[in-house]
Image: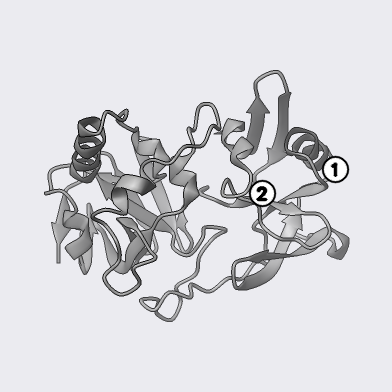
Amino acid sequence: MPSAELDDHGFVGDRRFMVVTEAEGLFLTQRAHPRMALIETSLTADTLILSAAKHGSVSVPRASSPTPHASLQRRVTVWKSTTSADDCGDEPAEWLSDFLGGSLRLVRMGGTYQRLNLKRAAQAGDVVTFADSCPFLAVSEASLADLNGRLVAKHEPALPMNRFRPNLVIAGCAPYGEDEWTKVRIGDAVFRSAGPCSRCPITTTNQETAERGKEPLRTLATYRRDPVDTTDVNFGTNLIHETKRGTVRVGDAVGII
């Protein structure tokens, strides 16, 4: 995207929908369901469109009704957070259930949605969407280039940035320079570090085919283990925005504060 607007939760439109189990309201991710990688998404001004090869598509309104019915509310859980979300109806539920298997529902953030950011770096007023823990993940191009150099040296293929799913990609710093940030300014917006991002099996999932391998976690484990919790393998850094309104643009300068 050439630019993105900020609101209290992060980038407008970013991770405002979630797939959950129908019975328990538990969130689904590619960790257990790599086939989710095959679902394409696109946004119009008013609509989210889900599609998949040979499976057609389904459209869902981006915004909830201003006066949602209680029957359309669903309790959903993301890790340690349980909150209320708006059910998106039977059509997307049937589409997802058929494609992924099981009894699933699609939910969106609505007027009753409340989820505090539980990271230690969070402050009063910091909230988060359906993301794991933080509204922003920054990865530098230099970090990926360093990792890919190590992979190629082992006769493994280089990996694209989408394996790591950052929503902020930084150019011009040293490899893993993002590890050292405490607070940064991107354009006119200020962001606070919430610590390193420990990586999971989604990074080993080919986002084009949903096939899963062993890299990059096998290589990252040789040099990127967390010094406190050595079971964690880190790549990229989590950020919380202190500037709750504004615009971030491709080409914005990034400065350490």
* Left or right, residue 36 beside residue 133: right
Q: List x then y, in percent, for residue 219.
A: 30, 46
Q: Residue furthest bottom?
A: 124
Q: Which residue is mark 2?
A: 63
* Left or right, residue 247 beside residue 185: right
Instruction: Place residue 190 in its image quadrant.
Output: bottom left
At a point 62% along the width and 49% down the height, the residue shown is 32
* Left or right, residue 156 beside residue 115: left
Q: List x then y, in percent, for residue 116.
A: 53, 74
Residue nearest the viewer, comparing 68 with 97: 97
Q: List x then y, in percent, for residue 150.
A: 21, 39
CA neighbours of label 1 inside 10 A, class few (<14), some (14 to 19), many (20+)? few
Q: Please indicate, yes or no, whether residue 171 appears anywhere in the rendered image.
A: yes
Residue nearest the viewer, comparing 245 with 128: 128
Q: List x then y, in percent, for residue 135.
A: 44, 59
Quadrant into which the C terminus falls:
bottom left
Q: Residue furthest top?
A: 54
Against 127, residue 15 (above or below) is above
Query: If you read the primary sequence from the N terminus, does the residue marked by circle 2 or circle 1 appear first?
Result: 2
Distance (Cα) linking label 2 and label 1: 16 Å
Q: Which residue is mark 1?
A: 90
